[in-house]
Amino acid sequence: HRDLHLSIRRQRQMCIRDRITIISSGLTEASHFIKSAGFTKIDELNYGTIHHSYKFPNIRIITDAKNIKLLTADMANKGNSSLIVSIGFATSVKAGLNTGNLVICNNIFSLTGPPAYWSRDSASELTTDALAREENFQHLLHELRRGPIIGNCLTLPQHTVNTNMKNWIGYRFPVSIIDTDAHHIVEQCKISEIPCMIIRSIVDPLPQATNESISFEVGRITGKNSLRLFDILLCYPAAIVKALKTATRQKEASSSLSAFLLTYANSKLKDK
């Protein structure tokens, strides 16, 4: 009996060391993967909602991640995650990237403050873990119908930028995409000494302007707020059309993330 208990304990320790934590700032980004991989909500913590799947016991998902500093610190203290994979949506600032294209981020730049003060010299820069990237994802590229590219990301304090700003960023910075949280996630993972991967799915290609604030507002209008939706339809019909188009692009971007994560999760099962 003692040997059996020791064996079970070792297996649990191995599971902890090999555990992958996927984090998402919202639910939409991970929704397709959660459904297709059989994840269910198991807990609500200060830093997000935890999802677990019996099919993939060594992978957990944290959606609506609110406090990345607390999240990474908790994982470092408990030693219960060997890799953090951050997924999310992004805006393209380079031609040739379309909705649903995936970018595995290498260098992450960051700008703060109002746009009037943005410049290449004022940007801070971090680099993601090359070893984690090579070990975990390079061998998957040939298995995917639409494989990801390796690129750089710029994190901004705001997500709503117009086409002129996209072109300016694409010209001034060596980046392919922009988002709102990648730099902070990498920064906190480095502080907590947890390897980190940043994967972004394009939801706004270069020719289009983002409508994030509109789409988020429409997404919250349900049930008792249906009259509010009717008011918006009357006042801003063009904005609603744009918001619906954004929702369609988000669905495609989420589906692309799901296909990638499913391939990755299944590869981890084969490695066992």
Image: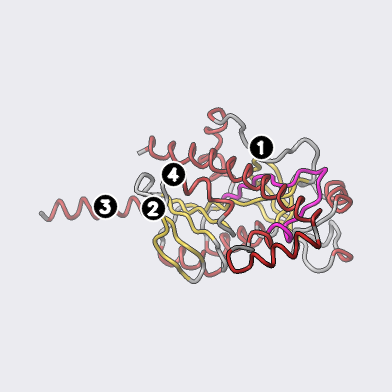
Foreground mark, 4 or 3? 4
Q: Which mark is residue 10?
A: 3
Q: Quadrant of the N terminus?
A: bottom left
Left or right, 170 with reference to 20: right
Circle 3 Cα neighbour tier, 10 Å, few/some/many (<14 / 14–19 / ≥20): few
Mark 3 vs 2: CB contact within 8 A: no
- Point out which mark residue 149 bears: 1
Q: Amino acid at mark 2?
A: Arg
At which x and y percent is residue 81? 44, 56
The answer to which of marks 1 and 2 sits earlier in the sequence is 2
How many angstroms separate mark 3 from mark 2 (CA)?
11 Å
Residues under numbered marks 4 and 2 in contact, where contact means CB atoms less than 8 Å apart: no
In the image, farthest residue toward the bottom? 46
Magenta residues (range): 197-215
> Which residue is tagged 2?
17
Indicate which disc residue 258 carries.
none
Q: Is residue 138 left or right of residue 2?
A: right
> Residue drawn 71% across and 50% down?
244
